[in-house]
Image (cartoon, helix red, strand yellow):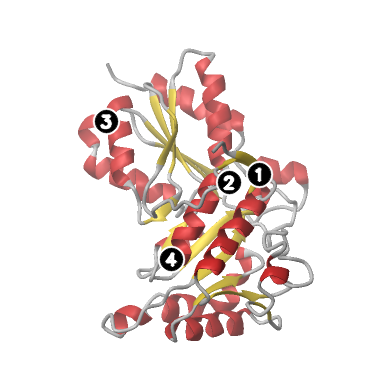
Amino acid sequence: MKSRYISCSKAISEAIAEEMEQDETVFILGEDLVAHGGIFGQFSGLPKLFPDRIIDTPISETAIVGGGIGAALTGMRPIIDMHFADFVTTAMDEIVNQMAKIRYMFGGQAKLPLVLWAPDGSGIRAAAQHSQCLESWFVHTPGLKVVVPSEPADVKGLLKSAIRDDDPVVFFQHKSLFAQRGPVSPEPYYIPLGVADVKRPGAHITLITYSRMTYRCLEAAQELAGQGIDAEVIDLRTLKPLDFNCIAQSVSKTRCAMIVHEACLTGGFGAEIAARIGEELFDCLAAPVARIGAKDVPMPFSPVMEDFVVPQVADIVACAEKTVKRKRL
């Protein structure tokens, strides 16, 4: 059966509906779910299909996450909607000291099958408190899995796997990608966590990326091809577990690596990848590993300033050109 072109929002609602039909322990907990189908329409239609399993809550992220943790400990599989990823700050104790650590502290006697749904990123001109990419905070916290998909097919397959997982998963969906369309199979399927995807094969440089920057790297790769530079684009899809084998295979081939993410450059996940490449693949490298991230400033509200802060296609092209020129023979 052929794939259909649907949006990320539609892929999300399909994934959840399939899992809810299969397992009555799956439910959603969060704000403005029933009346609006989620702030980005990602839960549209679900309240009518599952009226008792889409639960609106008061405006208290602490209560939402705490309730989800309690439900998961008693055998349910909650999906906790954070509305915006930025709002995790009000529930950090529940997330990093409870959700992430309970299974370990109970010696594996309890499972915590929970998905923390966190729309992140810029692009909708929502200013500094509603436009952050915070994945590094949670990659740095042992006990959590971190998912950062880009295209609708990956969103659906990874979300279904996250719901099935017995460990807590922080699922970042970029705010500007909810309307992004792409081919998605109508048949149920799963994409395992921890498996990257080569979105474009290449020979001269490896662009390692995830989330919205995947599309900008693909656009940059097209421009680079016109200049005779063949760029391979890897969409990590999940940051923890990380598919370093995919990175290693690509860098061993191209001998040149560049990491691109939207989060601030300092302390961003790109630094961890660069360090591992330097430690484990140093003999393969023909040039220093390059990184691109957002400037280290709060996200501006002004569209012009926001675009200045966030990496653009031209920035990726310029950095890739410079890196390839530094390659040793």
Residue beneath disc 3: 252
Q: Are marks 2 and 1 in contact (CB under 8 Å)?
A: yes
Q: What residue type is disc 1 on? A: Ile
Residue beneath disc 2: 152
Nearer to us: label 2 or label 1: 1
Residue beneath disc 1: 6
Q: Dot 3: few (<14), some (14–19), or many (≥20) neighbours within 10 Å?
A: some
Image quarter hosting the N terminus: top right
Q: Looking at the rendering, which quadrant does residue 20 occupy?
A: bottom right
Q: Dot 1: few (<14), some (14–19), or many (≥20) neighbours within 10 Å?
A: some
Q: Are marks 3 and 1 in contact (CB under 8 Å)?
A: no
Q: What residue type is disc 4 on? A: Arg
- Residue 164 disc label: 4
Badge 3 or badge 4: first in the primary sequence: 4
- Residue 287 disc label: none
Of 191 and 312, the residue lying toward us: 191
Whether residue 10 is visible, yes or no, is yes
Mark pair 3, 1: CA separation: 36 Å
Total count of labels:
4
Q: What residue type is disc 2 on? A: Pro
Q: Dot 2: few (<14), some (14–19), or many (≥20) neighbours within 10 Å?
A: many
Mark pair 2, 1: CA separation: 7 Å
